[in-house]
Amino acid sequence: MSRPLLPLFALVLALAATRLAAGTVVVTVKDDKGQPVADTVVSLVPLDSAAAAVPPPAEPAVVSQQGEEFTPYVTAVAVGTRVSFPNHDKIHHQIYSESPAKPFAIPLHGPGAEQTLVFDQPGIVALGCNIHDAMSAYVVILATPHFLKTPSDGTARLADVPPGRYRLDVWHPRLKGDPRRDIVVTADTAATQSISVSLKPDKRLRRAPDGGGGGYK
Ligand SMILES: [Cu+2]
C-alpha cells in the first residue's frame, strides 16, 4: 500500500521546489501623461508550455448593479469562474452580452434579484443593460493563473510565477494599440515591467459614488 505514495511524495517535493523558485513580475501601467492606470488586466501566458490549469474559485465573482452602474467596471476571472449579478438598485435592470466568449441575456429583473453565470471560455465580455444605455462593464476571462487587475496606483504584483518565457498581455477598455511584450521570468527575482499605454477618452457617465472603478470585488 505504501508504494504508490512514493511517486506522490516526489511530486509534492517537485511542486514545492517549483514554488520556491518562482519569480515575481511587478507590472506598472501608466498613461502617456505618466498617470497610473487602474482597471488594466495584466496576464502572463507561458510561451514554452501550456498554462497550468487552475480550478476556478469556489466563490463567484460579483458584478453589482448599483446606482445605475455595473460595479466593478472591469472584472478579471479565470476560465470556469461563476459570476453573479446582484441588483442592489431600487429599479429594474436587464443585462446582456453579445461577445463571442459569452453571449447571454438576463431578462428584466427587479431589486434584490441575483443571477449567476459560468464564464467558461477565454475572452473579453462586454456587458450592457437594455434599459440604461450608459451602463457598461467588462468581464475578462483568462486561461492562465497569472493575472491581476491594476488598482488605482496602476501596479499589479504577479507572484509565484514559475521561471520561463511568457507573453505579458495588457488589456484596458479604452486601450489604443497593443502593448503586449515577451518577457523572461527568472527564479527568486522580482522584475518590474513598466507599461505605457495610450487611452481613448473616457466617455462613461459616472453615477455610483465610487465611480464604478473599484470597491466591490
Ligand atoms: Cu439598467
Image (cartoon, rainbow, N blue to C red):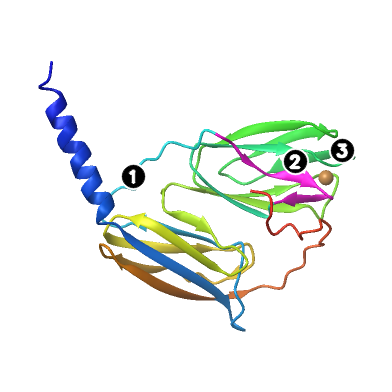
- Residue 197, given in percent of the width and then of the height, sits at 55, 75
Please state the extent of the stretch shown in magenta in the rendering.
59-71
The disc labelled 1 sits on which kind of residue?
Ala
Q: CA distance from mark 3 to mark 1?
A: 40 Å
Image quadrant of residue 173? bottom right
- Residue 2, given in percent of the width and then of the height, sits at 12, 20
Query: Which residue is rendered at x = 68% and y = 49% of the image?
Result: 216
Foreground residue, 12 or 181?
Answer: 12
Q: Where does ligand 1 appear, by image quarter? A: top right
Task: Give above or below for 16 relative to 45.
Answer: above
Is the residue marked 3 within 8 Å of ligand 1, measured from its CB?
Answer: yes
Foreground residue, 153 or 51?
Answer: 153
Q: Residues within 10 Å of mark 3 (few under 14, many from 20)?
A: some
Is the residue marked 2 within 8 Å of ligand 1, measured from its CB?
Answer: yes
The disc labelled 2 sits on which kind of residue?
Ile
Is label 3 in a helix, a strand or a loop?
Answer: loop
Residue situated furthest left in the rendering: 3
Query: Which residue is rendered at x = 45% and y = 62% of the image?
Result: 157
The disc labelled 3 sits on which kind of residue?
His
Q: CA distance from mark 1 to mark 2?
A: 32 Å
Total residue callouts: 3
Tell me if residue 65 is in the magenta stretch.
yes
Query: Which residue is rendered at x = 50% and y = 63% of the image?
Result: 156
Kindly identify which numbered label has been placed on residue 52: 1
**Disc 3 and disc 2 in contact, CB within 8 angstroms:** no
